[in-house]
Image (tube, coloured by chain):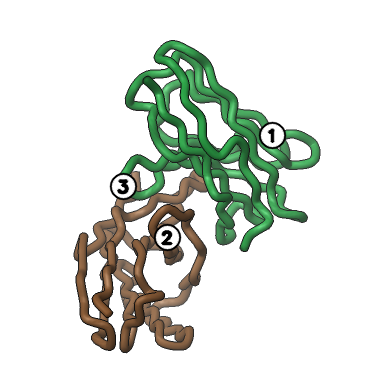
Chain colours: A green, B brown
């Protein structure tokens, strides 16, 4: 079991609302990445944070934003939720930007 | 962006049979990672391959990286019901983006 924890585990939101998901990285890991995983698909890279700076971004619109804090924990914010945002959101931490990723258990977001 | 094709999409085997999943890229890869995701779970890192022609073993699992570093495979010998899950390959691009294949869902009939 990894030391990456995410909260909440499940969440239901209404279309148009905003949501904040949280992630605590494994001890000693300074890099955090966020992924969106739709049912039956592989995880899709949203962005990565390294030492509080966004370090890379996938093909997601600006309404997906994030933060990394000095203790390397992280938040994913999604504004103006759409039905297609319903997915499992995974946080992964790693020792460095090019090292293996250790995933949290994910937050299951449902947008209705 | 970097893409990887993973085949097959699904594989159903009888317990004790072997299983292989393949990952292919049109471009040369710097490295490749493999993950396993149990049903309802999260991806768990299995291994990273870096060198051309590299072969690594973990008990019944054998991982290979092609000589041209454009393909990789994961082979499981004598599958067990505990092997059930989706196996993903993942490659890292220049912007640190980790791109996952679509995965191979393995089911095992006891």
Circle 2: element type: strand
Circle 3: element type: loop
Label annotation for residue A38: none
Q: Where is residue B88 shown, x and y percent of the image? A: 37, 61
- Residue, disc 1: A68
Q: Where is residue A25 shown, x and y percent of the image? A: 69, 48
Closer to the camera: disc 1 or disc 2? 2
Quarter holding the N terminus of chain A? bottom right
Q: Where is residue A102 shown, x and y percent of the image? A: 58, 57
Q: Where is residue B71 shown, x and y percent of the image? A: 30, 69
Closer to the camera: disc 3 or disc 1? 3
Q: On the picture, is A71 further left or further right than A96?
A: right
Residue drawn at the location 49% of the way across and 70% of the way down = B46
* Whole-number angstrom distance, CA of label 2 to CA of label 3: 11 Å
Q: On the picture, is A76 further left or further right than B94?
A: right
* Whole-number angstrom distance, CA of label 3 to CA of label 1: 26 Å
* Whole-number angstrom distance, CA of label 1 to CA of label 2: 26 Å
Quarter holding the C terminus of chain A? top left
Establish if B29 lies above or below A78: below
Residue drawn at the location 54% of the way across and 22% of the way down = A19
Q: Are marks 2 and 3 in contact (CB under 8 Å)?
A: no
Label annotation for residue B37: 2
Residue drawn at the location 48% of the way across and 54% of the way down = B42
The disc, 3 or 1, on the residue closer to the chain's N-terminal end is 3
Circle 1: element type: strand
Q: On the picture, is B8 further left or further right than A23?
A: left
- Mark 2 belongs to which subunit? B
Q: In the depicted view, which residue is nearer to us: B36 or A51?
A: B36
- Residue, disc 3: A41
Identify the residue at the far right of this view: A70
Q: Residues within 10 Å of mark 2 (few under 14, many from 20)?
A: some
């Amino acid at each position: 079991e990894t030391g990456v924890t995410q909260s909440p585990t499940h969440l239901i939101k209404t279309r148009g609302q905003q949501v904040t998901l949280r992630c605590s990285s494994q001890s000693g890991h300074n890099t955090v990445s966020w992924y969106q995983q739709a049912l039956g698909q592989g995880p899709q890279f949203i962005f990565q944070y390294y030492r509080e700076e966004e370090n890379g971004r996938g093909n997601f619109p600006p309404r997906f934003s994030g933060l990394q804090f000095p203790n390397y924990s992280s938040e994913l914010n999604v504004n103006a939720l759409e039905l297609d945002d319903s997915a499992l959101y995974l946080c992964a931490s790693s020792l460095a930007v090019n090292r293996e990723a250790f995933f949290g258990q994910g937050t299951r977001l449902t947008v209705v | 962006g970097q893409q990887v094709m993973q085949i097959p999409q699904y594989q159903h085997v009888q317990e004790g049979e072997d299983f292989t999943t393949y990952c292919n890229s049109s471009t040369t890869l710097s490295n490749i990672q493999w993950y396993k995701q149990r049903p309802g779970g999260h991806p768990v890192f299995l291994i990273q391959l870096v060198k051309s022609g590299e072969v690594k073993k973990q008990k019944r699992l054998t991982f290979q990286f092609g000589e041209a570093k454009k393909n990789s495979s994961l082979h499981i010998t004598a599958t067990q019901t505990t092997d059930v899950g989706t196996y993903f390959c993942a490659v890292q691009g220049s912007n640190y983006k980790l791109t996952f294949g679509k995965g191979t869902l393995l089911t095992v009939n006891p």
